[in-house]
């Protein structure tokens, strides 16, 4: 599952990088929680929680349906 998540993140990263941000996969738990670190301008952006939930989480769940939740650490 981790490889499929990394592959999906590669599709998302160009959008984040266009605004000076990025995302890094930290951990995938056994119960389907994906832990990400938002980097660059995404790490301090006040809209980062919306980007995480309505953007990144939605796309990751489409690509890897086993994912239960995506959180930022």
Image (tube, rainbow, N blue to C red):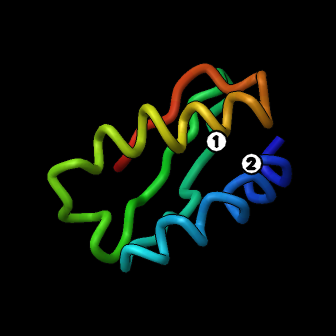
Using the rendered view, name the quadrant where residue 62 is placed: top right
- Which numbered dot is residue 28? 1
Cβ–Cβ under 8 Å for marks 1 and 2: yes
Quick check: 33 left or right of 60?
Answer: left
The crowding category of the residue bearing disc 2, from other C-alpha atoms within 10 Å (few below 14, some 14 to 19, many at least 20), is: some
Please name the residue shown 48% across and 52% down the image: 36
The crowding category of the residue bearing disc 1, from other C-alpha atoms within 10 Å (few below 14, some 14 to 19, many at least 20), is: some
- The image shows residue 49 at horizontal and vertical percentages of 29, 41
Per the image, label 2 sits on a secondary structure element best described as: helix
* Residue identified by numbered label 2: 5
Per the image, label 1 sits on a secondary structure element best described as: strand
Please name the residue shown 58% across and 49% down the image: 27
Task: Report the quarter where the N terminus lies.
Answer: top right
Using the rendered view, name the quadrant where residue 31 is placed: top right
- The image shows residue 37 at horizontal and vertical percentages of 42, 59
Please name the residue shown 33% across and 77% down the image: 40
């Amino acid at each position: 599952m981790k490889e499929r998540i990394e592959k999906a993140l590669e599709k998302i990263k160009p959008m984040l990088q266009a605004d000076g941000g990025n995302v890094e996969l930290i951990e995938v738990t056994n119960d389907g929680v994906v832990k990400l670190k938002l980097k660059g301008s995404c790490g301090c952006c006040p809209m980062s929680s919306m980007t995480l939930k309505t953007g990144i989480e939605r796309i990751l769940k489409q690509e890897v349906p086993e994912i239960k939740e995506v959180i930022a650490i």
